[in-house]
Image (tube, coloured by chain):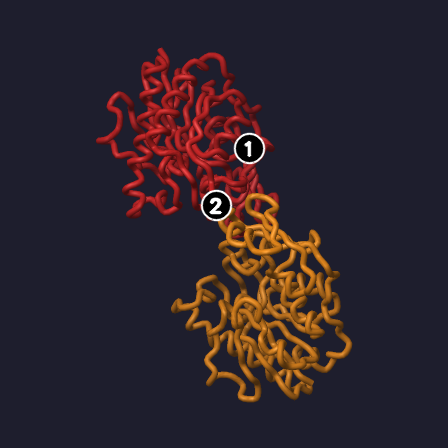
Chain colours: A red, B orange
Amino acid sequence: MKKIYIVADMPGASGIVNADQCRWGGFLWREARAFLAADVNAAIEGAYAGGADEVVVCDAHAGGCNLPLERMDPRAIYETANREELLPGLADDFAGLFIVGAHAMAGAQEAFLCHTVDNAVWFRYRLAGRECGEIGMWSAYAGHYGVPLLLATGDAAACAEAEELVPGVALAGVKEAVAWDRARTLHPAEARGRIGSACRRAMELVGKVEPALIDMPNEAELEYVRCEFADEVAGRQGAERTGPRTVRRRLESALDVRRGF
Amino acid sequence: MNVYIMTDMEGVSGIVRREQVAPGSAAWRDALRFAEADFNAAVAGAFAGGARRVVLCDAHGGGNNIRIENMDGRAEYERPTGRGSVMPALFSGKFDVALLIGAHAMAGTQGAFLEHTQSSASWHNHTVDGKRWGELAQFAAWLGHFDVPLALVTGDEAVCREAREFLGEVETVAVKTALCRQYARSLPLEAAHKAISEAAARAVLAAGKVRPFKPKLPAEVRLEFHSAEGADGLARRPGVRRIDGRTVGWTASTALQLIGI
């Protein structure tokens, strides 16, 4: 029984070349949902073609509701993330984690819409002492259940970040950043082909890739863009202020890695 | 004795929450009287200290924070005219001493009311030869370029500390204490106005003893933004180098280039 968990984010979807296309609820976003849907469908198809028995998709961009379900592959199950649980439906019986539409961490170079959780609030995030973005957060969270990251699709910077985290991970680079808010993309039809074949390769990695394991207990540290955010969090239980804009939090397990710091 | 008064709004007595410095808001409109009173106190003090000519620059958010009919009729009033002329009168007139009224601390200062450097929404750190600078040092260096010493700084306790750190022997008047970034506790207005006025008079009387702030040149400037988006905007200007995803740098050969190029 091979279960695959797919996290879908929007900035790294093929066909999306402008920041406005990712602005939830906007006119351009409404149209761009079709690009995301096509990439995710290609990944679902690739997973099944590679031998998956069950696929769960987490619609993770901006709180979810980006995937137009009527256009999505009916074989998969769909859910959204929340502030407490990064990947709510993930469990220890999954064989692998796929990230579709990924973007690089805040501060990355030549990276389309690079950010970590919230571009207007999170400046730099460190997990167990290592600078980390959402790809790293998701793979650490999955590591708690012994689930390895097997695939990432997105721009060249996101792919490089995934490769550094998990050498040998299956990748489908579908675009390159031109500026922070502009990208140059493959044609979505070409991208879908590459995503499909990368997913089939990823299925061959099942059982061969180690999950991302972090020694626990450990720490996460977040530097905010302004002091006000650290002011707010610093008084809370488990949070220690380590600098004017920086707060550190103890992690009992990787399940404590979350969007609400 | 010609006196130049640079002003900002965050460090004005009576202003104790963020909304009061947001141009256009009802709270801001109501807070203009606080700004006018602190500025008038400085003008009156300057004249009492022997000024012949006083020019005041209404600089918060580019100006528009004073109603001229409420201002001391003996002074002249101006506002920044955009990039390149933050304090326009310096280019045409000769000034003996400057005062900075209503100042705030640099971005990343803990326990400072509305700390930021230029833009709280995009600037993370501004450094000159590796040392972090805020607007206080920027203004002082700008004035120094015109051989004008900065002799008085008023604002919250944090910016007064910053002023002593950068300028050494400088008059400071702390009119408030930050409770956190977004809230402050102010001195009673009358006490604040009296203190500002007296300090302004002392600063003007002692003008000849204060040296202009002249950092070593050429100097290496780094501007780190919250996001790569900010760096993109500057990276292609002549002389500007991209240091990393969200940082640009350049070599300043004049003090005016320490702030922008």
Q: Chain of mark 2?
A: A
Q: Which residue is mark 2?
A: A179
- Label 2's element? strand
Amino acid type at mark 2: Ala
Tally of marks: 2
Q: Looking at this view, is B106 or A119 the one in front?
A: A119
The structure residue drawn at horizontal position 53% and vertical position 56%, both measured from the top left corner, is: B181
Q: Looking at this view, is A22 or A175 the one in front?
A: A175
- The image position of residue B207, as x and y in percent, is 73, 79
**Whether marks 2 and 1 lie on the same chain:** yes
The structure residue drawn at horizontal position 67% and vertical position 81%, both measured from the top left corner, is: B94
Q: Decide if residue B88 is on the left or right side of residue A261.
A: right
Q: Is residue B82 above or below residue A85?
A: below
Q: Which residue is mark 1?
A: A127
The structure residue drawn at horizontal position 31% and vertical position 46%, both measured from the top left corner, is: A28
Disc sitting over residue B112 in the figure: none
Could you classify mark 1 by the number of other residues whose Cα lies within 10 Å: few (under 14), some (14-19), or many (20 or more)? many
Q: Chain of mark 1?
A: A
- The image position of residue A105, as x and y in percent, is 50, 37
